[in-house]
Image (spheres, rainbow, N blue to C red):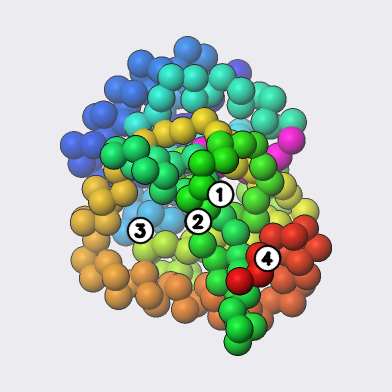
Amino acid sequence: MSTRILIPTLGKKCLYNCIDSIHKYTKKPYTITLLSDGNTWAEAINIGLKEEKSDVILMDDDIEVRKGWLNNLNEYKKLADIIGWTLQRPDGTLQCSGCYFYRTKEKFIFMDNYHDRTRSVRLTPNISTSCAFIKKKVFDKIGIFDNTTYKNGCHYEDSDFCMRAVKAGFKIMVIPETVIHLETETKKDFKNFKKRVIINKHIFYNKLNNDKKYIKILEKNNFIERC
C-alpha cells in the first residue's frame, strides 16, 4: 500500500529539498500531496485530510528526510497510533524528541520538548506534527485539527490534537529515526509570529490546566515530571 504524505506549503525554496530527500531516501511506494490552500497550517492540513481515506504522514515543507526514515514504520504502527520522528536542526542539535510535562511550584502544568540524546522508542503524551504518522482511525474518532480555537495559526494546534487523542485512548510514540527540520525557514514567513504564538500558547495552557481528566491520564502514565 502506498504511503500518503501531506505537505502544506507556501512554495518556498526548501520545498524542493524536502521533495528531493523523499525521492532519494524512500524505497517503498508513496504519494505526495501538496497543500497550498488555507490561511494557516491547520487549515491547509484539514483541507487535505478531508480528502484522505487512509493513514497519512504529515510533513512540513522545510523537512528533509534521511536514509532509512521509513524502514521500521510498519513495526512501530503495531505499538502506537500517532508516531513522531525525532527532529534535528541542520547544525546537528536536537530540536524535539517527543514532549514531557512538568508542574511548577504554583502547580501550573507546562510542556517542553525532550532535547536529550536517548534516541529510543518511547511513548510520549505529545509530538510535533512537523513530521508525523497518524492513523486514519484517530481522525475518525476525534476529528481534524482545531483551526477555530487556534485561529492565529501559529503552534499548539498539534498539541491540542495530541491531547484529544490521548484522552480518546490512542497511543503516541516518538521514534529514534531522525529528520532535519529547518525551523527558521518556517517561522520567518509569518507576520507577527511571536505575538500569534503567545496567543495560542495561552489558549492551550488554559485548556490543559482546566482539564482534570487529561491531567489524571498524564499522572497515571508518569508523563508529568517533577521540577
x then y, percent, for residue 130: 43, 45
Q: Which residue is mark 4?
A: 224
Q: How far apart are labels 3 and 1 at the CA level?
A: 23 Å
Between 140 and 68, which is closer to the camera in this rendering? 68
Instruction: Mark 1 and mark 2 in contact? Answer it, CB < 8 Å.
Output: yes
Looking at the image, is mark 2 or mark 3 earlier in the sequence? Answer: 3
User: Dot 3 lies on which element?
Assistant: loop
Q: In the image, which is nearer the foreground, mark 3 or mark 4? A: 4
Q: Which residues are magenta?
A: 79-85
Residue 62 on the magenta segment: no
User: Dot 2 lies on which element?
Assistant: strand
Label of residue 113 in the image: 2
Task: Identify the residue at image location x=38%, y=54%.
Answer: 41
Label of residue 98 in the image: 1
x then y, percent, for residue 88: 39, 40
Residue that protrudes farthest toward the top in the picture: 27
Question: Please, what is the three-letter code of the amino acid marked with disc 4?
Answer: Ile
Question: Please, what is the three-letter code of the amino acid marked with disc 3?
Answer: Thr
Residue that protrudes farthest toward the right in the picture: 220
Q: Which residue is mark 3?
A: 40
Residue 82 on the magenta segment: yes
Few, some or many C-alpha atoms within 10 Å of disc 3 (few <14, some 14-19, many ≥20)? some
Few, some or many C-alpha atoms within 10 Å of disc 1 (few <14, some 14-19, many ≥20)? many
